């Protein structure tokens, strides 16, 4: 499965992708929002291997794709939608990006493509996402996509020895269609 946007290719992961994943997941700016203090080759290989295993599922419900710059082919992150089971009509949106690429709109561009895939191809009713409350950039991505703040989970994430709140965002298919029609993005 491949999705194309103006500047990006979202493609299936391959085994060799662990090396660029390890590089960006080792960046202290990335680690700030995750519960682990560091990453190893074994961690990155297992992370990429999990996505490859999802590709092989007979009735696939999780679609996490590598984000690659169309110009140059550099892997800069991942983005996807994940259902709990085949019958679900809702899914979780998740994305991460190499900190060296933050601030260029890549996460929003990739996530918009995944929302379109979720609503158009998977025929989802609702897509939701969550981020650490202190991650204003991630919250901003979801807001740019038209997702609405649905709630705050108090002290739900344990990161580097302390509790953090999480923000939960969601968007319904009819909101996506309405917003997309207004913006001309469909």
Image (cartoon, rainbow, N blue to C red):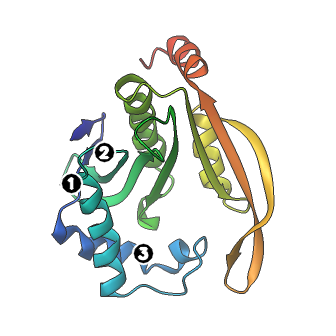
Q: Dot 1, crowdedness within 10 Å: few (<14), some or many (≥20)? A: few
Q: Is residue 170 left or right of residue 78?
A: right
Q: What residue is disc 2 on?
A: 60
**Residue 48 at what x, y percent from top left?**
29, 68
Q: CA distance from mark 2 to mark 3?
A: 26 Å
Q: Which mark, by number, is residue 75? A: none
Which mark is first along the chain, 3 or 2? 3
Q: Are marks 2 and 3 in contact (CB under 8 Å)?
A: no
**Residue 70 at what x, y percent from top left?**
22, 46
Q: What residue is disc 3 on?
A: 25
- Residue 41 drawn above or below residue 84: below
Q: Is residue 118 left or right of residue 22?
A: right
- Residue positioned 60% across, 53% down in the render: 138
**In the image shown, does 183 or 85 lie closer to the viewer?**
85
**In the image shown, does 37 or 72 lie closer to the viewer?**
37
**Residue 23 at what x, y percent from top left?**
34, 77
- Residue 136 drawn above or below residue 15: above
**Residue 178 at what x, y percent from top left?**
58, 13
Q: Which mark, by number, is residue 56? A: 1
Q: Secondary structure at mark 2?
A: loop
Which mark is first along the chain, 3 or 1? 3
Q: CA distance from mark 1 to mark 3?
A: 25 Å
- Residue 156 drawn above or below residue 83: below
């Amino acid at each position: 499965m491949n999705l194309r946007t103006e500047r990006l290719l979202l493609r299936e992961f391959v085994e060799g992708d662990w090396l660029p994943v390890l590089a960006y997941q080792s960046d202290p700016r990335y680690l700030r929002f995750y519960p682990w203090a560091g990453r190893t080759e074994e961690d990155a290989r297992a992370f990429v291997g999990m996505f490859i295993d999802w590709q092989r599922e007979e009735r696939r419900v999780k679609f996490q794709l590598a984000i690659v710059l169309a110009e140059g082919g550099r892997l800069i992150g991942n983005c996807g939608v994940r259902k709990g089971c085949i019958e679900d009509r809702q899914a979780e949106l998740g994305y991460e990006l190499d900190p060296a690429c933050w601030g260029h709109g890549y996460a929003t561009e990739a996530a918009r493509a995944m929302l379109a895939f979720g609503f158009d191809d998977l025929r989802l009713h609702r897509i939701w996402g969550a981020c650490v409350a202190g991650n204003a950039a991630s919250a901003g991505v979801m807001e740019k996509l038209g997702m609405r703040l649905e709630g705050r989970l108090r002290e739900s994430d344990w990161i580097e020895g302390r509790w953090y709140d999480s923000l939960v965002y969601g968007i319904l298919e009819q909101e996506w269609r309405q917003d997309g029609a207004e913006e001309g993005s469909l």
